[in-house]
Amino acid sequence: MGGLGKTTLARKLYISPNIASSFPTHAWICVSQEYNKMDLLKTIIKSIQGCTKETLDLLERMAERDLEIYHHDLLKERKYLVVVDDVWHREAWESLKRAFPDSKNGSRVIITT
């Protein structure tokens, strides 16, 4: 049910100085009803690496599976917090979840629906 404050709560956590200092790598993506897995992965990668010309060129040349592997490798050695906001369909998360490594280092993914 919309309007209950799920995104607001997630945003307060995400910007909290204590949380930010605990997760050196962090990203926020909004999924919504219409989503594209490649665009979501690119958004996370750009949020983490920045939008340099080299990164943008590299991302544009990658196929979906390559993006997934690149995303996984980018996060695998990091402690990260990623908020996946406004997920309408379970399939959206199911298509993304294998790109998130579980390195047993305290990383977290928060999903709002």
Image (tube, helix red, strand yellow):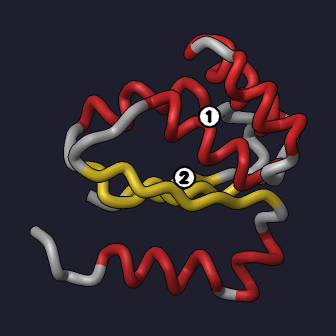
> Up-down: is 51 above or below 26?
above
Residue 100: mark: 1
Q: Residue at x 45, y 75 (%)?
A: 10
* Viewer-proximal residue among 84 and 30: 30
Q: Quadrant of residue 85?
A: bottom left
Residue at the left extreme of this rendering: 1
Is 3 situated left or right of 107 in this image?
A: left
Residue 109: mark: 2
- Density class for disc 2 (Cα within 10 Å; few <14, some 14-19, many ≥20) is some
Is 17 situated left or right of 112 in this image?
A: right
* Viewer-proximal residue among 110 and 60: 60
Q: Residue at x 75, y 76 (%)?
A: 20
Asked if labels 1 and 2 touch by Cβ distance under 8 angstroms, the answer is yes
Residue 1 x %, y %: 10, 68
* Viewer-proximal residue among 66 and 22: 66
Q: Disc 1 marks which amino acid?
A: Phe
